[in-house]
Image: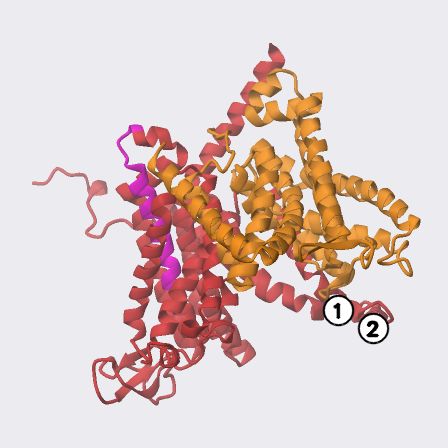
Chain colours: A red, B orange
Amino acid sequence: MSTRPAGKRRSLLPPIRFRERMRDRDTAIYGVLIIIALIFPLATIFATDSTFLVSQAGHAGTFVLLAIGLNVVVGFAGLLDLGYAAFFAIGAYTYALFASAQLQASPAHHAYHLPFWLMMFVALFVAAAFGAVLGFPTLRLRGDYLAIVTLGFGEIVPQLFFNFDQWTGGINAIGGIDQPSLPAWITGPWAGANGIAILQNFTCKPFWASSAAPCYSFSFDPIAYYVLVLILIVAAVILVTNLHRSRLGRAWMAIREDEVAAAAMGINTVTTKLLAFAIGASFSGFAGAYYGASFGLVSPDQFYFVVSITVLVMVVLGGMGNITGVIVGAIIIYFVLNSLLPSLPSTVESFASNIGLGFLNDRNGDWPGLAGETQRLQFLLYGLILVLMMLLRPQGIFPSRVREQELKHAAVQEEEAVVEMTHA
Amino acid sequence: MSLTDYGFYILCATAIVLLATQAFTNPKDFFQVTIFGLADGAIYALVALGYTMVYGIIELINFAHGDVFTLGAYIGAAILAFFAGANEGSFVVVNVIALLLVFPIVMLIMGGINITIERIAYRPLRNAPRLAPLITAIGMSFVLEGIMFMWHGAPTVHFPDLLPHGPGFQTTIGGVFFGFKDVFVVVAAAILVSLLAVFINGSKLGKAMRATAQDRDAAQLMGIDINRTIAATFFIGAVLAGAGGMIWGLYFNTIYYNLGFRTGLVAFTAAVFGGIGNIPGAAIGGLIIGLVAAYSDGYIGSKWTEVVIFGILIGVLVFRPTGLLGMRVPEK
């Protein structure tokens, strides 16, 4: 006879504890993000009858990937990287060179058309290798020196792609980059010639084969890229979350908080920092390959310092060290830069005519019209947004919990110190 | 001496030998390029001083500094436009008076603007996470560029050509051409840098700045007003940058709204090259970077100049992280 009371009977399934989970902020954010990500294409296509917003979202996904990667360097390991776009460029060019007709015209005289799925990982390793090569001599130095070295590297790399125009086309960019494609045996309702297909019938010549065979190409369908980038982001988030919780992640945080103490605890600081740097760079290379494929065109001016700064702003603004915060930060900044600010002139114009100030809209002598003036204001507004958001929330929108506690702790200590001083 | 030190000296020696060969085989071109380099370098030195002083005292890479430099040129151009006109390019007493008047005015205005920027964007974040002020610095840089963009738009702006040039104000010595402008730039920069050196080493505020840079808490315990000292650092940095902007405008006569971005990065490289936080280092670093840029333009091709400059930046940090004269190593 069992003496176990009825109330303590074990359930076969583990308890879900839904309410408890909802109280965990990160889980809630992930939930909201996933729901939005799933509804977004349906809702926007239904509302606007075009896939423009979906393609924008796919482009924003590149920046989410970049922000997740930079977060490993800046947020976890506390290393300031001001040249992150360089690795992005390296990834994008790695894919563009080996998946287009570009090398036909170069001294190599042979066009490679390697598949995206392979080049994605090649780009990842190439970027990581460059990260390691750059990081190896410099990571032994302290703090800001790394920031300065990466700044210099970030300036050099696009310039090199620009200067070696024999190979990279220089200012003419590399166009006609191959689209990713799936082999014909991976078939399903999403591929073929039916109504809901997002992958089109196509013929591809695999690099090992001599003749072309049928396959499903991504072509330029925004929805296909949207799905791809979602899968990449989910994979990246899982990877980074596990890294964060691993031994390596703890070592990164230890180094971030106090490098000397971490070294005293037996952490090899150089190797650990090098890993953070290389892993961060590899995400950028990965994102670069995706970017090259989805955009179909790669040119040096897409990878200037502004890109590094934008990604850094996304990470810091979202909340350094916190993956959900960084994702939200990336989405917000992307929205502000690519949607809010460009649409501002027309919004202001229609607002003015609605409230009876329509005469402001016309050009008049030096006055370029309200829309023109707002157009000119964009730089200023972006700067003001950055300054204000940092002043209001220096720790970011969703700071990491550990960081938050530390900041509170520091604030309390400071207050105590002030109290002591006034009493003394 | 470690291995990396040898690497540094070997690299320097190679560069000097290569340049010396050029100097012997074609001295005319070499000295002509040197004169361009010195004039550029003098301006970089003025901007680099602001970077190095601010970094030395609060360890912030002040991204807005390059734009403070450009804004100085814009304001200078606006004020000088009253005096310009028929007098451009000739030697008239009015021009001399105008310059003597406008230089201090622009310098003071820029100092005031930079103090305001520090008060609004950096001071509230002094105890925030380290990256927060960096982001506001970038934000302020966009704001300043935005203001200049609103003011004159994207096209280049003409800076009044008030320095005398033409016959009588230029000479050729051994085939090397140089004019009054080149001399003016170098002399003006040298005067400003010497004044700064006297101020930093001689005045009480200069002493307070050095103390704050060394150890902020200890300086505070000694009764130094930290906020005032940091504000003074920003003021002096902007005074030099404003003068640098004026000099740039007078020398090149063309300015544009995002001029400060590239100039700022190069000047920052100069500051690192000389040893960040080190004031004589920044002045010498500026001159050397100016020369390097000119030699690279002349002998390698201008599309490689950026690669050369930032390659040097990386090389210096790898082989000699404290910079050329770097004595101060911030360990905090």
- The stretch in magenta equals A264-286
- Asked if both marks, 2 and 1, belong to the same chain, the answer given is yes
Mark 2 crowdedness (10 Å alpha carbons): few <14, some 14-19, many ≥20: some
How far across and how far down the image is residue A246, in percent? Answer: 27, 44
Query: Is mark 2 in CB contact (under 8 Å) with mark 1?
Result: yes
Looking at the rendered structure, the kind of residue marked 2 is Arg
| Residue A363 placement: quadrant | bottom right
Tell me, for residue A363, which label it has, or none. Answer: 2
Local SS, label 2: loop
Marked residue chain, label 2: A
Mark 2 and mark 1: Cα distance apart in space? 9 Å
Looking at the rendered structure, the kind of residue marked 1 is Gly
In the figure, is residue A309 to the left or right of B153? left
Q: Examine the structure image and report whether residue B276 is included in the region drawn in magenta.
A: no
Q: How many marks?
A: 2
Q: Examine the structure image and report whether residue A274 is included in the region drawn in magenta.
A: yes
Residue A74 appears in the figure: no
Mark 1 crowdedness (10 Å alpha carbons): few <14, some 14-19, many ≥20: some
In the figure, is residue A420 to the left or right of A285? right
Along the line of sight, the residue nearer the viewer: A419 or A387 = A387
How far across and how far down the image is residue A78, in percent? Answer: 42, 41
Residue for badge 1:
A372
